[in-house]
Each structure stands twice: as C-alpha cells, then as structure tokens.
Amino acid sequence: MKTKMKKTAVVLMSLIMVMCYMPMMAFAETATDCDGGSGCSHEAAIGTTHYDTLSEAVLAGGEIVLLKDVTKDITIEEGKTVTIDLAGHNITGSSNHTIINRGTLTVNGTGSIINNVAGKAAVFNDKAGVATLNGGKFTGNTWYVIKNIGTMTINGATIQQDHSGSSGIDNGFANSGETYYGNAPCKLTILTGTLSGGMNTVKNDDYGILIVEDGCFSNTSGPTILNWNTASIKGGTFTISDENASGVLANGYLDETADNGQFTISGGAFTAYNGTGNLFAFGVGTKKGGKLEISGGNFAGSVAVNDEYPCNPTITGGTFSSNPTDYVPTEGYAKYLKGNEYIVLAEGEPAPSHSSGMNTWTKDADGVYVESSVAPTPTPTPTPTPDDNVTSNPGDKTTTADVETSTGTDGKATATVDKATADKIVDKAVENKSEQVIVDATTKGDANAAEINLPAETVKDIVEKTEANVVVKTDVAEVVLDQKAVEAVAEKATTGTVSVVVEKVKEDDSQVQVELKVVTDNGNVTDFKGGSVKVTVALPAALKDKEVVCVYIDEKGNYTKVSGVKNADGTYTFTTGHFSTYAVMTAEEADKVIREQEKAKNDRLKAGVKATTLKASSTAKKGSITIKWKKSYGYKVDYFQVFRSTKKNSGYGTKAFYTTKSGTQKTYKNTKQVKKGTRYYYKVRGVRMIDGEKVFTKWSSKAIRTAK
C-alpha cells in the first residue's frame, strides 16, 4: 500500500511539472525563425525571430521591427526595455491607450501610432515610464494624443491633434484626482519635431516641467504652448493661423506648488495671426502670480497683455514687431527701432547693424534709439588687384566676395566659395571690422534659382571672429541674415557645406513666389532661433504700381501675412524668422485668398457645430429641478439655451427659458415657476457666433421631470 501511494505521488508530480511548463512551451512556439517574404504572417520581429503578435514581441523585449499594420493596445511594464521601429506601418488602439509605457520605450522610423478611442491617448507614459519618440506620427481626435507623467523626450516625431476640444500633449496632471498626483516626474523635453492642432498644442499641466529646444509648432484653435507650471523655450517656430486663437503662448498661475506659472523664453520665432494678433494669452481661471521672462527670440505680433494676465512680461532681449517698452526694465537695457522692428539688448552690448542708408543711432523722448543718416567723412575705396575677388570698404564697413557663378540649362545658378576665397573673406572682415559680409553671386543673366555653397567652417568663423551680418546676392533675391540667424546656421552646420538655396517658384502679373532653404550636412535650418532674415525680391512690372503684401504659405497652402515694405527701386523686402515658401502679391488677391480660406474654415466650423449632439438629464428636489447636459466632443459653443414646456412635443416657444453665460456651463437649476406635481419637459441647444451668424447645435434629448 505504501509503495502504491508513492508511485501515485510520482505520477501526479510529473503531471504537475508538465502542466507548469506548458505555457512556456506555448510561448516559445509563437517565436519562430522566418525568412520573411510574402508568406510571412507575423506582426513583429526581433532580429531573425518573428512573433505572431506585437504583444508577444513586447513581452520578450528588445529591438522590435513592426512587420504589418496592427490594431491593438500594448503595455510595456516597469523594468522592460523596448525599441519599436515602425518601418512604415501603423499601430492603432483598439479599446484603451494604444501604448501604455511603464518601462523604457523608444519609437523610431516612419509610420503612425493612432488612437480614436474616446478618452484615450496614442501614448500614455506612466510615472515610471521613460519614453523617447525619435520618429513616427502620433495622432488622435478624442483626447490627448500624448499623456505624460513620466519622463519623455521628443526628438523628431510628429504629433497631430485633430480634436479642437483637447490638447495635443498633456504633460503633468489635469486634476488632483489623477493617480500619483504630485508624485511623478512629469518632465517633457522637446529637442525637435512637428507638433500641431488642439485646444493647446502642448499643455504643461500641474507639476509639469517642459523644456523646448527646437521644433515646429502650429495651431489654429488655441495657443501652441499653455504653461501652468515650469516651462522654458530656447528655440523653435511657433505660429498661429486663426484670428480666434487667444495667443501664440499662454501662461497661468494658481499656486506655488503645482501651478507656479514660471515661463522663460530665450529663443525661437513666434508669429501671431497675420503677424499682428496677440502673442500672449492666459490660462482660463488663472490667478495673479508667476512670471514670463523673455531674453531672446523673434516676436511678430502684439506683446501687450491685459489686466487679466497673471503677470506682466519682463523683456530683456529679443526682436519685436510691436513696441515692447512697457515691459523692458527702465535700467540696464537699450531699445532700438530698426526699420519696423524693435530690438532689445543689454546696455553695453554692441548696437544692431544699421538698415541700408542709415548710419547713426539717436535716443528719442521715449528712450528708444532710432536710426538716421549722417553723411560720413569720405574714405577712399582701395583699388583691388585684378585677381583679388574679395574687397573691403572701410567707409561702409563691408567685405564683399564676387564669386564665379555658372548657370545650367534648367536656369539654376550655382556658386561655390572655395577655401582660399573663404579664408580671405574672414581675414578681411576681421581686419576691417566689417558689419556685413557680402557674397555676390549675381549673373549677367536672369536665373530663376540659385544655390550658393560656403564651407561650414567659414560660417563658424564669421560668427566667432566678427559681428557681421551675412548678405547673399542672387538674381532671384537678396538675403540678409543677421548675426543671430548666422549663429543658428553655424550651430546646425558643424561640418561640411552650407548651401543657401533661393528659387523663384512662380512669377506672373499677380505675384512672385519664392522658396528659401538653408541646407547643411546635418539637415535643413528652418528656425533661426531668435534671429531674423530680410529677403528682397524684384517685383514684376505689373506689380510696381499696385499695393502689395507678403504672405507665408504653410504646408497646407494656408496664407498668413508677414511684415514687409515696397521699396522705391521697385523691389519688396520682407522679414522672417524661418525659411519656407513666401509670395509677394497684390493686397487684393491676398485678401481674396485669405477670405476664401476663412470662409472654408467657417463653413467647416458651421457644419461641425450643426452636427454637435447634446444629451440632457434631470433630477428634482423640493421646489427645484436641475438639468444637466453633455456635449459631444469636437466643436465649442459660446453659450447654451434651455427651453421648457409642459407638453412633450410643443409649447417650448421661440425664446429660451434660460441662457447660460458661457459655453462651459453644463447645468441649470430651475427654481422659478415650478409647480409641485407638474411634469416639465426640457431641451437644450448650443449656440456659437461664426462670421456674424448664430449657428445652433442639434437639440438635446428631452429631460423629463415631475416637480416635487
């Protein structure tokens, strides 16, 4: 009997061991060696090992290559390190956040991470999560595209929010009820990338720490950045293309712990709507406090803030299209008006280089240095030797290099500054203390495009050894980069060659359109980090006697006016903080296109508001009935109207029984004309003024309640 029991125990133990190893055996079977090809049905691979599902590859950890589009939610647990190469494929969330990261996540390659699930993000980076987004496009249209309470770096990814009712990124906590509130890193660093859309493109929320080094930020519905806690911007382009947006940047303050409103800006290019709208807005519900400190950058728009702003800006540096005097400290700083731009510098810093034809700074009654022209003492111009293509003029503080240019059959002129010429440029500019280094690549013909190549080392030497602007003259346009813009180019172009490319994309009787690029071995320079560039183009004969304006044309074809002036010699000069496509055209045609774009936008808004749905409910207490309603996501309203009747399908009248004061109020307590025992029917609709027209949402469901 004892022997039999022992045998039985041995058999049972063997069965238990087999059953324990079965999950491991089943898991091992999902990872196979596969040679790929059309017969491969796996979702992901780690090296030569293919996995049936992406989830299994994530569980294994390592460097994952996505093999096909997948629809599912994945979680990287704490302690796990995962790199996902999208490899041109998409990951779409199915029922939760598309990716929840509690470990270490890196996303590379092209492809998209998408989430369309209500209230969920494409990436939720949890408290312990460390995420680096080097590539990929992240999109959503119901909630935040990115939610970060861990540590995240964006270095080349595209973030696109298609829902105007939510921010593209929420860094930090939206409310005190969230898990880990006040006990998580909440640190977001944006090195570069393309970020667009949303109620705010980036919201730096409770306890958030935001650092922006570079990147392209754009929005229509609201600010590109809304800061509630601690944020710094060192570079990048920030553009608003809708007049309804409150400002390019917004700041808010509630307390010294979670929402301290500390916002510092030391570089970047900031463009308000049409170059004249508000630059600075504030978070709804803000209190007085915090700070906005600006020490650099290029600002096109109004710097003025109203009494509701949490604090007055402090401006100690930068270039502005509107007068910043009210916000510049009265001691220690100088203000210059150069052309149409105000420049703020610390006292003791060299004054800006002069505009063409100007040579003297004089302080006016408001303490602003303005330009004037005083005839200089004539200085003989040295006669260059026949073989010397680089000359200096001590009188106007210039060094000019005439470079040999060749024009191809395609009409493109190309000029390369060789090392010998480059060295002479630097040496003579230093000796002459030149304020301008001019590279003259004009031809005797009329090239429609030009490419001028300079050694990157020469650009660096100009920055380090001189205080000169760089002027590039071509048949298409004259381009003047100020010292800060040249610094941005030198920072990007550490080795190799810098190419300035100017192309006339279109020219007819109605406009001249040019595309501008600065190309380096490390990529294009799109942002001059607070520097500015003046571009002068020749106007077609048909435009010389007409009122003309300059417009920036973004990648979607939208027009935004930029500041510029028509010159007496039949040319037009505009100023920009980044390179892209620009058109100089009749003001009439520009206004027509902008009106058409505005109409298209308004038509879209009207259709969206009309399609917006409401769901109403009610409760009753003695002497009152409370109505609550929820609005579908997507389109804001200005206010709500509540209608009441004692009949289900009639008797509501044409005048609202009650009208809210804002579009955020979602409840109404009815205490007047409430009779005990009477059944009341309520319905609600939203109202928004668009282009002077009242536009209504759909009627809500009826809320029915008998008074107590």
Image (spheres, grey):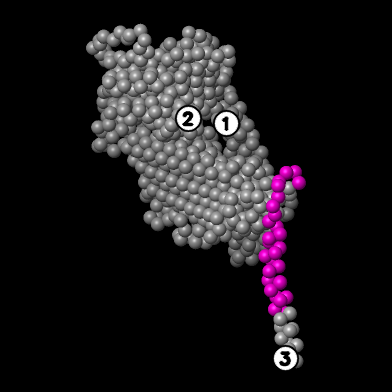
> Where on the picture, by quarter, is residue 279?
top left
Residue 544 shows in the view:
yes
User: Cα distance, mark 2 to mark 1?
Assistant: 21 Å
Q: Dots 2 and 1: beta carbons under 8 Å?
A: no
Which quadrant: the N terminus?
A: bottom right
Q: Marks 2 and 3: in contact by CB < 8 Å?
A: no
- Span shown in magenta: 12-39
Residue at coordinates 37% horizontally, 13% vertically from top-left?
A: 389
What residue is pinned by disc 3?
A: 2
Mark 3 or mark 1, which has the lower sequence index? Answer: 3
Q: In the rendering, at what x and y percent does residue 9 appear?
A: 71, 83
Classify residue 325 as left or right of residue 100. Answer: left
Type of the residue with mark 3: Lys
Viewport quadrant of the C terminus: bottom right
Name the N-terminal-most of marks 2 and 1.
2
Amino acid tagged 1: Glu
Q: Label for residue 520?
A: 2
